[in-house]
Amino acid sequence: MEIIRIPILKIEDFLIASIQTALHDVQAMDFKDSLLQRIYETKSKGVILDLTAIDVLDSFVGRLINDISQMSNLMGAKVVITGLQPAVAITLVELGLELPQVLTALNLEKGIAALRRVTEHSTNGRA
C-alpha cells in the first residue's frame, strides 16, 4: 500500500497540515510521526490541522487527532483545528473526544490569528 504523505508547511513559527483525503490507519500513523518530528526539528510554537476537505472521520482517525493534539502540547506546540465540517464535529463529540487543549477556528486565516494570540500570550507570561 502506497502511503501518500500529507504536506506539512512551516509559516512563521507555526506548522500547517491540510488533510485533503480520508486517512487510512497506516497513513494516519505516518502523519502523526512526521508531524511530531517536524515540531521537534523546527521548534514550532503551534500547529494547525486543517480538516476543511474532510467530510467523514472514522473513530481511529478521531482518536489519533486527539493523540496528536496531546503530544503536540507536550512538545510545547499549541494546536488549532480548522475547517471542521458538521459531520466531523458530530463524530468527534459522539466519540467523546473533548480535545481540552485544542482551539478550533472556522478557517485557516482565523486559525493563524488564534495561534498568534495564544503563543503571544504564553510568551508574554514567561519570565
Image (cartoon, rainbow, N blue to C red):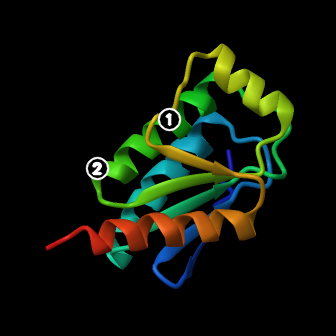
Q: Quadrant of residue 90?
A: top right
Closer to the N terminus: mark 2 or mark 1? 1
The residue shown at (70%, 65%) is 110
Residue 44 or residue 8, whichever sits in front: 44
Is residue 7 placed above or below 42 in the rendered structure?
A: above
Specify whether residue 38 is in view.
no
Residues at discs 2 and 1 in contact (Cβ within 8 Å)? no
Q: Quadrant of the N terminus?
A: top right
Residue 22 or residue 111, whichever sits in front: 111
What's the amino acid at mark 1? Asn
The residue shown at (62%, 16%) is 95
Is residue 88 placed above or below 1 in the rendered structure?
A: above
Q: Residue furthest bottom?
A: 12
Judge from the rendering whether residue 55 lies leftward or rightward of residue 25; answer left or right.
Answer: right
Tag 1 residue: 66
Tag 2 residue: 74
Residue 116 or residue 78, whichever sits in front: 116
